[in-house]
Amino acid sequence: MLDWTRARPQGDEIPEPAMARLGAQILPRGRLVSVSGPDPERRQQRLWRWAEHLHRRGCSVLWLDPLSFCLDRLLDGEASFLVLSPRSYEAVAGLLERLVPIGRPMTIFLDDFAALRPEASQVDGTEPVPLKWRHDVRHLARWTGFCWRYQCTLVIGRRGYDQGRDPVDDHAVVRFQVSPTRGSLQLLEFRTLPPGPGWRRLPGD
């Protein structure tokens, strides 16, 4: 069992120098980070650079890409870190259960979140699947608990929404947005929270 009572880093350096002046110097350990952007290629390119930067600095990195697009768009040869393509919420949860507890804290990149589906929806003749929103909330809450317990960072790439928040935003303490035209990164929110295994925004937050 890992002992998290000892002094430990509170996060990993963000490979974005411009973020320091906005007050976001680190990706906080044990939390969810949201990176939205309607252009999947620009978003993936930026997150892939983050993953390579953290790997070069000696961090453990896991890349999860449900659609396997990154292998065609971003990878010239073999990846220097683990790249997997889970297709469902349950597959991601299974990977976290097996990989996160056995080693040191890692940074996990999940792109594209919207591509995940319940396993029941991928098999003919199964029982009706509840609304996707309920699946999102249930699994995100579970992953938030995993991250806090083992002090891992889960960076979730997503397309974003024109109005309101989605469940990823409700669970993420840091929110970025990638410009669809220039590819520049904007900091939308950086919340400082008290220690705890998880949290969720309340209506009106």
Image: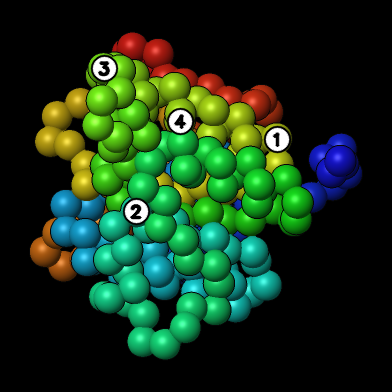
Q: CA distance from mark 1 to mark 3?
A: 33 Å
The residue at the point 12 percent across, 36 percent down is: 162
Residue to which mark 1 is pinned = 149
Name the secondary structure under disc 4: helix
Residues tagged 2 and 3 counted as in contact (Cβ below 8 A): no
The residue at the point 65 percent across, 51 percent down is: 99
Q: CA distance from mark 2 to mark 4?
A: 16 Å
Assess disc 4: are there few (<14), some (14-19) or many (≥20) residues with their C-alpha within 10 Å of its C-alpha.
many
Q: CA distance from mark 4 to mark 1?
A: 14 Å
Residue to which mark 2 is pinned = 66
Residue to which mark 4 is pinned = 140
First in sequence: mark 3 vs mark 4? 3
Q: Picture coordinates of residue 97 (x, y %)?
A: 63, 41
| Residue 126 located left or right of residue 146 | left
View extreme (top): residue: 203
What mark, if any, has residue 128 been given in the picture?
3
Residues tagged 3 and 4 counted as in contact (Cβ below 8 A): no
Assess disc 2: are there few (<14), some (14-19) or many (≥20) residues with their C-alpha within 10 Å of its C-alpha.
many
Assess disc 1: are there few (<14), some (14-19) or many (≥20) residues with their C-alpha within 10 Å of its C-alpha.
some
First in sequence: mark 2 vs mark 1? 2
In this rendering, the answer to whether 20 lies above or below 31 is below
Name the secondary structure under disc 2: loop
First in sequence: mark 4 vs mark 1? 4
Residues tagged 2 and 4 counted as in contact (Cβ below 8 A): no
Q: Nearer the viewer, residue 17 or 15?
A: 15
Tag nearer the camera, 3 or 4: 3
Residues tagged 2 and 1 counted as in contact (Cβ below 8 A): no
